[in-house]
Amino acid sequence: MVKQPLDIDIGMDHIREAVRPYPRAAMFELRDDGFGSPFEQLVA
């Protein structure tokens, strides 16, 4: 059985589609809300 070469672009497209229905990670949401430093995110 011959394996096909990995196409990273197709793989990333599949991952993006799979996680689309889920909310973004809280770390990124806090950053977008103005809590930029790790300390600010820790105490938020």
Image: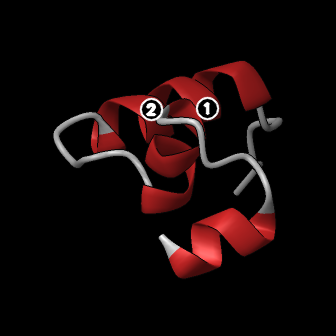
Q: Give the position of the N terminus as an image quadrant.
A: bottom right
Which one is nearer the viewer's eye here, 3 or 6?
6
- Residue 17 versus residue 3 in the image, above or below: above
Q: Position of residue 44 (x, y in %)?
A: 47, 70
Q: Quadrant of residue 40?
A: bottom right
Q: Residue at x 58, y 36 (%)?
A: 34
Label 1: how many Cα within 10 Å (few below 14, some 14–19, many 20+): few
Which one is nearer the viewer's eye here, 25 or 44?
44
- In the rendered structure, the answer to whether residue 16 lies left or right of residue 1 reads left
CB-based contact (under 8 Å), mark 2 and mark 1: yes
- Residue 38 versus residue 35 in the image, above or below: below
Which one is nearer the viewer's eye here, 35 or 10?
35
Q: Residue at x 31, y 42 (%)?
A: 18
Q: Position of residue 8 (x, y in %)?
A: 76, 30
- Label 1's element? helix
- Return the mark for residue 1: none
Real-space Cα separation, disc 2 to disc 1, in angstroms: 6 Å
In the rendered image, the residue lying farthest to the bottom is 43
Q: Quadrant of residue 9?
A: top right
The amino acid sitting under disc 1 is Met
- Return the mark for residue 16: 2
Q: Residue at x 50, y 49 (%)?
A: 30
Q: Position of residue 29 (x, y in %)?
A: 44, 44
Number of marks drawn: 2
Label 2: how many Cα within 10 Å (few below 14, some 14–19, many 20+): few
According to the image, label 1 marks what residue?
A: 12
